[in-house]
Image: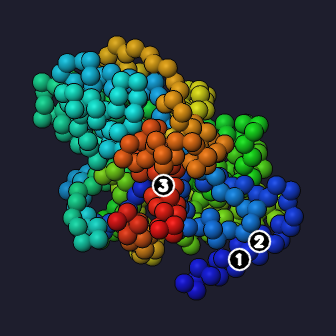
């Protein structure tokens, strides 16, 4: 339940952002990452961004996500 | 692949440096997501003989006291006009009054949400219902609950409350070290809890108990790097708190810590198998008392124990492996779980069932 996944911010509207996550769009709350900007990667846990990631960090975590998704199939 | 073999070489080198240690080395992976990743990657079989990994209390559903599970089912079944909003993992946990899924079949209104704000939205849409959000989870999840409570206040929702069972990982690690019969030589610390708390939060524990506390991420490389770092610290006799997981900052997420502290205060909490641990949970502050389901509704207390025959409590405290439980894969399976460790996608029993039991079955076939 502490699973978190990286996603890229496409647009921000107040405390909410639209992110893309492996090609899928979803909404996340950004109140915990007020510094997040459009184009940033964030780590998303249960609908809330919990930290901003560097691109390098995001790329590394993407590999994990891919494995996780394959693992759950 | 090259990187992975370099990490494995390093791990083997550190292991040799450690030399002969009577009884080997036993490390605990505190996080349920680690348990799943370790089983999925078959990482235990890559470790040198004598180096054991045991699971810890890192699955929020599994550590939730049975009394809370039964109280949630009571709220769902016995009170009229109540809607229970919960993360999906909680729905199938068996209890004295049956699971929430069974309550739903019996007519109770139980809704699965994937974010805390969805529970608030539910309350806004349904002014005729009392919406109770089952707030379980560790430091990773608690800030979201805090934000949801603040949102409900802003929106003036008198029909929203949270039934909290939020827990803090660090006090539980302390309690585990106090158990005389469970040996833990080092901790693989949870990556996403640490995104919130920061890796420095483990420094007092590492210093006081002289145990390596290494935060790692969730792929094979991360986990093996973390283990190699623990072994290096043991070999050098220099236990410390460090992180090998890049997203974890030394001080964590300050904004998340602030929001949590605004809404919650640290309180004693009951854990499955570990019992009451001082200052190991979060309760709503007096200023937010109106959103506290435990104060809004009269709740009977229930007994705190594992379901009959279930060793979930021993599993999450490192006393036994899932396969040591007589019910594992016989009476207890993911389709018909006896205890929470088989229900939750992050429970150790579910992870063992999915990756080891099935594999063993395939090999036999
Ligand atoms: S296998 Fe089932 S009954 Fe045994 S400890 Fe795990 S959850 Fe409990």
Question: Disc 2 on helix, strand or loop?
Answer: helix
Cα–Cα span, label 2 and label 3: 31 Å
Find disc 2 in the rendering and name its residue.
B14
Q: Is mark 3 within 8 Å of ligand 1?
A: yes
Compared to residue B170, the image places residue A49 above or below, namely: below
Question: Disc 3 on helix, strand or loop?
Answer: helix
**Same-chain status of marks 3 and 1:** yes
Residue at figure coordinates x 51%, y 69% from the top left:
B363
- Looking at the image, can residue B248 be seen? no
Find disc 3 in the rendering and name its residue.
B353
Please tell me which residue lies in front, B221 or A61.
B221
Whichever of labels 3 and 1 marks the residue nearer the N terminus, that label is 1
Residue B54 at x, y = what percent? 64, 52
Compared to residue B311, the image places residue B55 above or below, namely: below
Camera-nearest label, 3 or 1: 3
Q: Chain of mark 2?
A: B
Q: How is the image coloured?
A: rainbow
Whichever of labels 2 and 3 marks the residue nearer the N terminus, that label is 2
Residue B97 at x, y = what percent? 36, 24
- Left/right placement of residue B310 relative to residue A2 reads right
Compared to residue B197, the image places residue B9 above or below, namely: below
- Left/right placement of residue B82 relative to residue B136 reads left
Question: Disc 1 on helix, strand or loop?
Answer: helix
- Left/right placement of residue B289 relative to residue B326 reads left
Find disc 1 in the rendering and name its residue.
B10
Residue at figure coordinates x 72%, y 42% from the top left:
B182
Answer yes or no: do the residues labelled 1 and 2 have beta carbons within 8 Å? Answer: yes
């Amino acid at each position: 339940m502490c699973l978190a996944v990286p996603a890229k911010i496409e647009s921000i509207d107040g405390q909410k952002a639209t992110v893309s996550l492996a090609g899928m769009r979803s909404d996340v709350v950004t109140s915990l990452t007020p510094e997040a900007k459009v184009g940033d990667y964030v780590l998303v846990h249960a609908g809330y961004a919990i930290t901003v990631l560097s691109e390098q960090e995001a790329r590394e975590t993407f590999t994990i996500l891919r494995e996780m998704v394959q693992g759950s199939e | 692949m090259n990187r992975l073999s370099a990490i494995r070489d390093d791990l083997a080198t550190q292991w040799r440096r450690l030399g002969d240690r009577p009884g080997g080395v036993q490390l605990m992976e505190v996080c349920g997501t680690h348990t799943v990743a370790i089983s999925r990657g078959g990482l235990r079989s890559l470790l040198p003989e004598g180096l054991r990994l045991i699971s810890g209390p890192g699955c929020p559903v599994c550590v939730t006291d049975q009394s809370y599970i039964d109280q949630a089912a009571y709220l769902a079944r016995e009170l009229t006009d109540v809607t229970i909003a919960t993360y999906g993992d909680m729905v199938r946990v068996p209890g004295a009054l049956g699971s929430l899924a069974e309550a739903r079949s019996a007519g109770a209104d139980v809704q699965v949400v994937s974010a805390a704000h969805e529970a608030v939205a539910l309350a806004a849409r349904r002014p005729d219902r009392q919406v109770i959000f089952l707030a379980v989870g560790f430091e990773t999840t608690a800030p979201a609950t805090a934000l949801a409570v603040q949102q409900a206040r802003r929106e003036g929702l008198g029909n929203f409350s949270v039934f909290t069972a939020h827990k803090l990982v660090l006090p539980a690690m302390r309690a585990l070290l106090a158990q005389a019969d469970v040996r833990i030589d080092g901790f693989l610390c949870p990556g996403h809890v640490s995104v919130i708390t920061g890796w420095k939060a483990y420094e007092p524990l590492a210093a006081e108990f002289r145990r390596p506390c290494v935060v790692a991420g969730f792929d094979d490389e991360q986990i093996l790097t973390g283990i190699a770092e623990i072994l290096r610290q043991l070999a050098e006799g220099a236990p410390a708190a460090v992180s090998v997981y890049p997203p974890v900052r030394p001080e964590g997420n300050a904004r998340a810590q602030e929001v949590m502290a605004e809404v919650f205060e640290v309180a004693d909490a009951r854990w499955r198998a570990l019992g009451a641990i001082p200052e190991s949970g979060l309760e709503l502050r007096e200023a937010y008392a109106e959103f506290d389901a435990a104060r809004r509704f009269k709740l009977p207390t229930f007994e705190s124990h594992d379901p009959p025959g279930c060793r979930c409590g021993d599993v999450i405290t490192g006393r036994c492996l899932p396969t040591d439980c007589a019910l594992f894969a016989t009476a207890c399976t993911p389709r018909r779980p006896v205890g929470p460790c088989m229900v939750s996608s992050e429970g150790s029993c579910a992870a063992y069932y999915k990756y080891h039991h099935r594999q063993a079955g395939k090999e036999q076939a």
